Image (cartoon, rainbow, N blue to C red):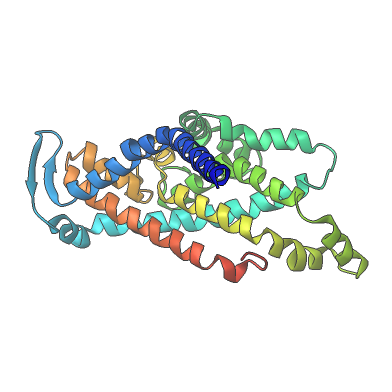
Amino acid sequence: MEIGRMRIETLKGVKRREAIIGLLFITPQMAGFIIFVLFPLISVFMYSMQEKNLLFGTSLFIGLENFRLLAKDPLFTKSLFNTLIFSSGVVPLNLVFSLLLALYLGGGKRGTRFVRGIIFLPVVTSGVAWAIVWKYLLQGGDAGPVNAVLSFFGITGPNWLFEKGWAMGSVIVIRVMKNLGMNVLIFMGAVLNLPDDVIEAARIDGAKRFSLFFKIKLPLLMPTIMMVAIVTIIGSMRVFDTIKLMTDGGPEGSTMVMVYYIYHQAFRMFDTGFASALAVVLFLIVLLLTAIQWLTRKRVSYYET
């Protein structure tokens, strides 16, 4: 009995020490989460119910008045619409091209290492540098290298970043090229880990290339596609640097997305309360979209439990 009691006490002591060690390991991460994520998030919700001026440092509780003003603000509607247009362009283009490139690079063809390096190069490039370089390349008239190449073939290029019909499309393409490499690497990991026996069995049964992709590979890749889609949507909804540096929200507000409008209200109009209300709305929209995708993932994933 004594020996059994000692063993139990020893096991309890070991578990207690393991629990303490585990807590010590996660404490820095939890502290960082509380200080840099949770506390700012709570502060934004509090500021959204205040008339807070950043310039004069004044603050007055006004309840939901900022949200009432926001609902009547035409610039909010415009920025929300622009954000949805931007996301609806970036997300499908990014997913389609990154998946196709991952399938090509995962096939072991010649030159894949070089192509992989070229694709990933924009990811490690500073976003500021990337935007500035492309702003120079897309200058209007013959001053821009892109238009100079087009004029060589007898094509008159537009003023890409300062014409309403071209500005949004231009920043979408630039953003897709900037972040394509990361998604390609994620998809490559999934492609290289596809079960060879399943694919080989499908080939033996006579599955052609397209049937093999749509009926075997694509269903197996759906969990990865859903994860990449969620990350890409979140990134596209909070884009700022590309818009700020390339178009500054123009022309005529055609590229003014919600994060840029939040910046405009907070640091140009100094209306921190209204900007915080905008940030709360954006947070809830992103949270809703993420929750919808997460809850519907099993319907499009054939083997996820």
Closer to us: 21 or 272: 21
Residue 165 vs 118, above or below: the answer is below
Evaluate whether residue 3 shows in this view.
Answer: yes
Residue 221 vs 123, above or below: the answer is below
Instruction: Residue 114: give x, y in percent of width and height.
Output: 75, 33
Residue farthest to the front, as pictured: 1
Residue 82 vs 20, above or below: the answer is below
Question: Is residue 41 shown left or right of residue 229?
Answer: left
Instruction: Residue 100: give x, y in percent of width and height.
Output: 70, 52
Residue at screen point 76% across, 65% down = 216
Evaluate whether residue 139 shows in this view.
Answer: no
Q: Which quadrant of the figure contains the C terminus?
A: bottom right
Residue at screen point 24% across, 59% down = 74
Closer to us: 44 or 21: 21
Closer to us: 287 or 239: 287
Residue at screen point 49% across, 66% down = 295
Instruction: Residue 203: give x, y in percent of width and height.
Output: 89, 64
Q: How many marks?
A: 0
Displayed quadrant of residue 111: top right
Question: Is residue 280 shown left or right of residue 187?
Answer: left
Displayed quadrant of residue 31: top left
Instruction: Residue 280: give x, y in percent of width and height.
Output: 28, 53
Residue at screen point 64% across, 46% down = 186
